[in-house]
Image: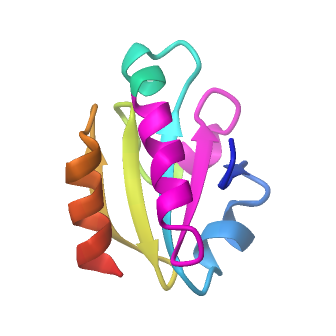
Amino acid sequence: MSGEVELTDSNFDAEVLKSDMLVMVDFWAPWCGPCKMLGPVIAELAVEYAGRVKVGKLNTDGNSVSASDYKISAIPSVLFFKGGKVVGQAVGLQSKADLKRQLDGLI
């Protein structure tokens, strides 16, 4: 996970809600096929947007509190946070171009 922050229920508040920059959070699980396909895209975006966007991954299997707080009912789900608030989301397998469009519109 180069460039990505591993998020947990215990560090979610500090890493996401209190971040000074835009945060993209990938809610995923190891058994989820589409999540595995999205993983490399998330990793590429973490490198491309380094310094401008914080990119985090939250394994919903071990961190159900955060997933429940944001009503994650389908994975992969990508939520965008700015100033501690959700400002965008993408549910299901997304293309890199679609995620870049969302990021560019939020930066």
Q: Could you tell me residue 17's position as x and y percent?
A: 59, 74
| Along the viewing direction, whichever of 46 and 20 lies nearer the viewer | 46
**In this picture, residue 103 sits left or right of residue 50:** left
Instruction: Examine the image and state in which quarter residue 75 appears.
Output: top left
Answer whether residue 43 is magenta in the image.
yes
Q: Could you tell me residue 86's position as x and y percent?
A: 38, 70
Tell me how the rendering is colored.
Answer: rainbow
Up/down of 92 relative to 80, above or below: above
Report how many numbered discs are placed on residues in the image.
0
Q: Could you tell me residue 24's position as x and y percent?
A: 47, 60
Residue shown at the point (63%, 26%) measured from the top left: 61
Residue shown at the point (32%, 67%) measured from the top left: 103
Q: Residue furthest front?
A: 48
Residue shown at the point (73%, 48%) measured from the top left: 8
Answer whether residue 41 is magenta in the image.
yes
Q: Which residues are magenta?
A: 38-67
Instruction: Examine the image and state in which quarter residue 21 appears.
Output: bottom right
**In this picture, residue 71 sits left or right of residue 43:** left
Q: Could you tell me residue 98's position as x and y percent?
A: 20, 51
Point out the image quarter for the N terminus: top right
